[in-house]
């Protein structure tokens, strides 16, 4: 299979998985941090931060649902305690309310409010966004100069949001890759920038080689 066909197949498989989680009547979507051995091993967050991010998403979703009900479709994504709100709400007051509710959740450090007022997304639009997310992820995987597992991707209204702990070099490159994906209207960086020295400290160290056995005398 050619590299292009392989890339397309990978994007399609991811899109099908993403589309299965969409619901036409769901007023609230969760970003959902995955906690597991492999994820923790490759994620630049601490295991404690991963668990906290998952709890933040659940608690924030619950608060928004209780107070706002069906007034909008809001996606909550937390990465290293930075919370991104995307989707649509009916009024500017609803947008402010959502931010206030999420900001009051324990361990939230920053809320990035990207909610759109008065422009409800259709199911087709959300499905298209899911497919775009899959294509961007596939392109990041193909970019050999990027550590794709360190970058979280979400899409709303054809705007791609990139989250993660990355260097300025990685942030620039990831945004460049995302902009090159057909159908992406805009790329928003929600990165936590770290230095190259910090990145080096995060890299797993290879175990020291075992001493060679001495030849029998």
Image (cartoon, rainbow, N blue to C red):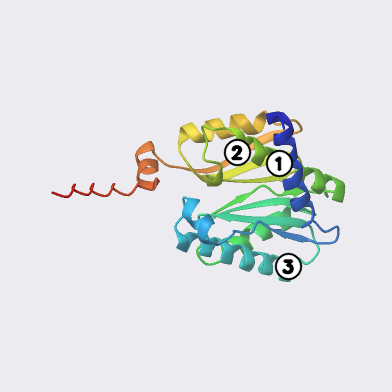
Q: Say which of marks 3 and 1 sits in front.
A: 1
Tell me, yes or no, if residue 211 can be seen here. Answer: yes
Secondary element at image label 2 = helix
Quarter location, residue 181? top right
Indicate which disc residue 141 carries.
2
Q: Are marks 2 and 1 in contact (CB under 8 Å)?
A: yes
Q: Say which of marks 3 and 2 sits in front.
A: 2
- CA gap, disc 3 and disc 2: 35 Å
The number of discs equals 3
Going by the image, does 86 lie left or right of 33?
Answer: right
Sort mark 1 into few (<14), some (14-19) or many (20+) by Cα contacts within 10 Å. some
Secondary element at image label 3 = helix
Give the mark, 2 or 1, whose residue is nearer the N terminus: 1
Give the mark, 3 or 1, whose residue is nearer the N terminus: 1
Q: Nearer the viewer, residue 173 or 7?
A: 7
Q: Nearer the viewer, residue 139 or 179?
A: 139
Question: Label 1: which residue?
Answer: 10
């Amino acid at each position: 299979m050619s590299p292009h066909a392989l890339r397309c197949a990978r994007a399609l498989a991811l899109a099908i998985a993403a589309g299965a989680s969409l619901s036409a009547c769901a007023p609230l979507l969760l970003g959902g941090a995955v906690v597991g051995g492999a994820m923790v091993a490759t994620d630049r967050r601490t295991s404690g931060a991963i668990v906290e991010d998952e709890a933040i998403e659940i608690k924030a979703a619950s608060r928004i649902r209780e107070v706002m009900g069906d007034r909008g479709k809001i996606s909550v994504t937390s990465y290293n305690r930075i919370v991104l709100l995307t989707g649509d709400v009916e009024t500017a007051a609803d947008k402010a309310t959502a931010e206030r509710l999420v900001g009051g959740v324990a361990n939230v450090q920053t809320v990035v409010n990207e909610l759109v007022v008065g422009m409800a997304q259709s199911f087709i639009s959300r499905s298209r966004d899911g497919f775009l997310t899959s294509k961007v992820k596939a392109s990041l995987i193909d970019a050999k100069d990027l550590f794709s597992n360190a970058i979280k991707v979400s899409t709303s209204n054809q705007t791609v949001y990139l989250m993660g702990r990355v260097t300025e070099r990685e942030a620039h490159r990831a945004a460049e890759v995302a902009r090159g994906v057909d159908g992406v209207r805009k790329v928003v960086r929600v990165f936590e920038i770290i230095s190259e020295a910090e990145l080096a400290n995060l890299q797993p160290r290879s175990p020291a080689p075992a001493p060679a056995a001495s030849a029998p005398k």
